[in-house]
Amino acid sequence: MRRFLLLYATQQGQAKAIAEEICEKAVTHGFSADLHCFSESDKYDLKTETAPLVVVVSTTGNGDPPDTARKFVKAIQDRSLPADFFAHLRYGLLGLGDSEYTYFCNGGKIIDKRLQELGAQRFYDTGHADDCVGVVLDLGLELVVEPWIDGLWAALTKHFTSVGGKEEMSGTLTAASDASPRTDPVALELLHVESQVELLRLDDSRKKDSEVLEQSAVNKESSALAADFESSLTRSGPPLSQASLNIPALPPEYLQACLQEPLGQKTNFSYQPGDAFNVICPNSDSEVQDLVQRLQLADRLEHRVFLKIKADTKKKGAALLLFLRAFLRALVDHTSDGAERRRLQELCSRQGAPDYNRLVRDARACVLGLLRAFPSCRPPLGLLLEHLPKLQPRPYSCARYFLNLTTIGLIFQITISPRTTNFFHLPNDPSAPVIMVGPGAGVAPFIGFLQHREKLQEQRPGGRFGAMWLFFGCRHKDRDYLFREELRHFLKCGILTHLKVSFSRDARVGEEEAPVKYVQDHIQRHSKQVARVLLHENGYIYVCGDAKNMAKDVNDALVEVISKEVGVEKLEAMRTLATLKEEKRYLQDIW
C-alpha cells in the first residue's frame, strides 16, 4: 500500500482530529498514513523520509505554531542548515487559523515557508482553513476542510504515479515562491508582517461536476421549500421528508466507560511570577443534572468516569475525548421513535445539509438541547463521551483573583494544572529596566512581577534595581480599574517607577493635558523614554492581553516609536523589534 507520513501540530485538538480524519480516509483511497504528532520526534525523521509528507497545523497566540511544534520549528529555523536540507521532501500542508486574528494561519505559514527555504517542494497546494467560517469537527467540516482533503487523494495518486515514472515530476510539483528566501535572524517576525488576514479560498475545482450540480439542486429545493414550509429542528417537509437519503456510515464505538467511587487527590507544584495555571471551568450544574437524569445516572453523580479504548477497536489513531463529530449520526441508532429517527437521519445526510447548517451549526445547538429535542434518544455514556468536545483549559495568571465560588455552604471544586510552556518571566538581572503593557485583565501577571520585586527589595535593601513602567488601560476609571489600591501602593513605595493609565470611555483622564484612550497612545506619548529603555538600557518589554487588537496596536506603536526616535524607516524599526523578540526582550502573553 502507498505510504505517506502524516504529521500534525495541535493546541486544542482540532488539527489532531482532522489528521485522524485523513488517516481513516486514507485506507479507502488505497493509501497508508503513518500518523504522528510533531512532538513525537523519535517516531519519524524528515532528514531521511522518502514518502510524501502531509502536515496539518493550527495557530496559537499571536500567530505562533502550537506548543507541540515549537521544538520542530526551532530546529528548522537553524540558519546553519543548507538550502537543500529538505530537497528530497515532497509535502502538502493544511493550516488552521482564525481570520479575526491578525496573523491568520501563521503557524502553518511559518512551517510552509521554512520547508521551501530548505528545498522541500509541494506536491499539493497549501490550504488555509478559517475557524471564523466554520472549522468544526462535525458535518460542517465538509464546508471548509473537506474540499482540501478530497483533493489530497488525487494529488497523492499523481505524486506516486510520477515517482513510478509514468509522469514527469515537474508536472506534479507546485513551484516554490519566486522570491528569494530570507535567511536573516528576523525572518520569522517579518513573516508576521507579510501575513495578511484572509478567508479560506480552497480550490473546489477538484469536485466532480455532478457533485456541484447536486448541491445546486439541493439549494434550489431548499429555497422553494422555505417559501411554503419552515422546517424546524424536529420536523421537515417535502421534498426532504420524502427524499432518499445519503447517510454517512456509522463508525464503530471505541470507548469503554467505567464508573468508580470518587477518590481524593492533592497535587503540589512550584511556580514563579509570570507563570499561569490552566483552569478547567466546570459545566453548568443545572445542565449536568439534566444530562445525568437523561442518562439515568443520577444515583452515581459523584462517581469518577474512567475511559479506556476498547481492545478490539480498529479505529486508527483512536484517542480519548475527541472533538464533537458526526454526533447526530451517532444518535440515530439510539433513537426509538420512528419520526425522530428519520429527522436525525435527514439532518446528518447530504440532502439535509441546509437544515443542518441553519438549525444545528449556525444555531449552535448544544448536546443537551439535541437530547431534549429528541426525547426517545438515549445514547450510552461511552458513546456520548466519544463525541463530546473536551473542556478546554483557560490560562489564568498567578496573581489573578477567582470569583468566590462558595454559595450557601457549597464549595465548588475546580481542576488546575501548571501551564506547559511558561516563558513570561522577569529578567534574571533585577537591574534591567522593565516596561509592562497590560490593559484590562492583562495586568494580572504584572501584579505578580511587582509583588516579587517588592520582596526582592526587602531582602536586598542596598541592591540595584531597574525602573519598572506599567501602561494600564480600561474603559472606565470608576468601574474597571483593576488592582487600583495595589498599584497605588507599589507606586507610593517606589516599586513601580512609572504608572500610565488610560480610560477609553471616559471623557477626561485626570491631570493629563489631553485624553489618552489606549495604552498604545501612552506609549507614543512617552516615546523617548520607551526608546531609551529598550535601545540604550538593554531593557525588557512585556505585553499581556488581547491578541486581536491590542497586541497589534502596541506593536505598531513600538514601530512608530523606534522609527521616530532613531530616525529610521519603518521596515528597519520592524527589524529592530524582531531582534528584541529573538533576544527574549520583547515578550507577549496574549490570547
Image (cartoon, helix red, strand yellow):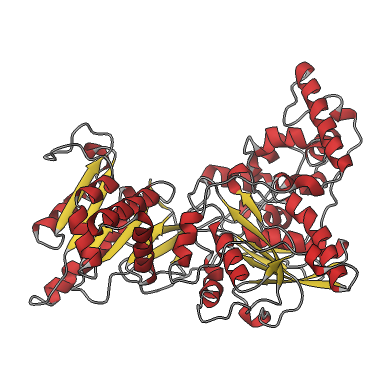
The answer to which image quadrant residue 110 occupies is bottom right
> Which quarter shows the N terminus?
bottom right
Residue 560 position in % (x across, y down)? 30, 51
**Is 521 or 289 nearer to us in this picture?**
521
Is residue 528 shown left or right of residue 302?
left
Q: Which quarter of the rendered picture does the C terminus lie within?
A: bottom left
Residue 479 percent location from the top left of the image? 26, 38
In the displayed structure image, the side of residue 446 where residue 171 appears, left or right: right
Viewer-closest of 22 and 253: 22
Tell me: 339 left or right of 518: right
> Which image quadrant is residue 302 in?
bottom right
- In the rendered structure, the answer to whether residue 285 lies left or right of residue 458 reads right
Could one spot residue 402 in this view of the protein?
no
11 and 293: which is toward the camera: 11
Q: Is residue 105 visible?
A: yes
Is 438 placed above or below 536 here? above
**How many numbered marks have been drawn onto this rendered protein structure?**
0
Q: Position of residue 508 (x, y in %)?
A: 18, 34
Q: What residue is rendered at 89% in x and 40% in y?
A: 210
Q: Residue at x 26, y 39 (%)?
A: 517
**Up-down: is 399 above or below 376?**
below
Seen at 22% across and 39% down, the residue is 477
- Choose between 203 and 1: the one closer to the eye: 203
Give percent across and percent down for residue 518: 28, 43
